[in-house]
Amino acid sequence: MELRTCSEITLTLSHAKMRRLYLEDVKVICGQTLNSFRNLTFRRAFNAYKIFISYFLSIVTRKPIVWGKPVFFYIEPTNRCNFQCPECSSGQGRLTRPIGMMDTGIFQKLIDLIALDTFSVHLYLQGESYINKQIYDMISYARQKKLYVSVSTNGSLIRKNNAGQIIKQAPDRLIFSMDGLDEDSYKAYRVGGTFAQADAALNLLIETKKKLNAKTPFIELQFIVMKSNEHQVDEVIRYGKMLGVDKVTLKTMQISSAENARKFMPRNKKYSRYILDGEDLKIKSKLKNQCFELWKTSVVTWDGKIVPCCFDKDAMYPLGDINQKSFTEIWHSEKYQEFRKRILENRRGASMCNNCNS
């Protein structure tokens, strides 16, 4: 459910050049947002209403009240990656949890349990989703259950021999990450890939979609703005327009240390979520003692662990395991409630929250 799409494109259009370039496409992008509601049922809408109301009451009372089930899920097909991006725990081999791939049996069991109330599943967390060869079956199964499905990829595994399958068994939305428009800027962060490969893969994807006259996926080109590519912000909008992607998203970079901030943080403060003062790296946003993610979203790692949100990359705050208990038991468990209460009282006390910009 892409509620942010229209507002994001409005921000993107703040520059005069971009406004002229993309004005004609606002209707198309906002139309995709409305189209994503096609799977909305009364039960799903009522569940979302219960989640919103219970979250509001939790803020007022400072006590965790949860009446519904998650509206969104992040489900990790794999935490294995074929790139070595400097700020990626998976690519750098810094994950302390096991590396593996989700079994389709576990996936289908989870989907069966959540499909009536949940609206959308994002099939990514850590790793490159298409490394798991079962990703096609996962997408198809979730879509059969009338769930809105998103997948994120670096595009490195898109080839002529599988482009047709990717389109025929496409998610509703495919996020294509490309953080540079020439070899120098691309390789500065996407270590292990090349711009030429990424450019060819994206062109192939769009051409195949047109050839098959397919309505899906909605192709979103994602561009993480950093020091090496911030001069290409206007250019990436033109590039996306020229290729025919459905949307271009500019994203701020998550940075783990002052040392890496000096390497990667863009000079234009508009595109950074941090303030660097000597060795002190601080998030710009003020962390309030509340977080809607713990009410509207749940995250499942490849081996079935439930964690609070996508910032818990290493599953440092496990809240349950779907191999041992049903998701409903975990969602309303004392352990989950204690974590929600902890965030309502002292969000900064959870280390993963200190890098969050929401």
Image (cartoon, grey):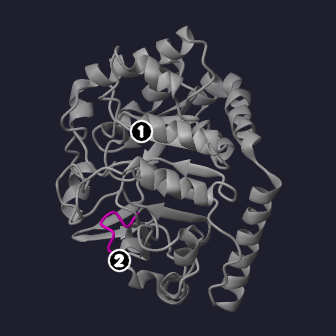
Residue 325: in magenta span: no
Q: Residue at x 23, y 69 (%)?
A: 278
At mark 2, the secondary structure is: helix
Residue 156 sits above or below residue 291 on the image:
above
Measuring 33% from the left and 69% from the top, which residue is drawn there? Answer: 315
Q: Judge from the rendering whether residue 279 lies leftward or rightward of residue 78; answer left or right.
A: left
Rendered position, 252 above or below 154: below
Residue in view at x 79 percent, y 59 percent: 43
Estimate how packed mark 2 is, as few (under 14), some (14 to 19) or many (20 or more) residues with alpha carbons within 10 Å: few
Q: What residue would you read off at disc 1?
A: 135
Relative to 78, does residue 184 appear above or below in the rendering?
above
| C-alpha distance separating marks 2 and 1 | 31 Å
Disc nearer the start of the sequence (2/1): 1
Q: Which residue is mark 2?
A: 351
* Image-quadrant location for residue 305: bottom left
Residue 299 falls left or right of residue 6: left
Of the residues tagged 2 and 1, which is closer to the observer?
1
Indicate left or right for 216 with 266 as reference.
Answer: right
Q: Is residue 315 magenta?
A: yes
Q: Is residue 357 visible?
A: no
The amino acid type of the residue labelled 2 equals Ser
Rendered position, 295 above or below 128: below
Q: Amino acid at mark 1?
A: Ile
Q: Which residues are magenta?
A: 311-316
Q: Position of residue 232 (x, y in %)?
A: 38, 31
- Secondary structure at badge 1 equals helix
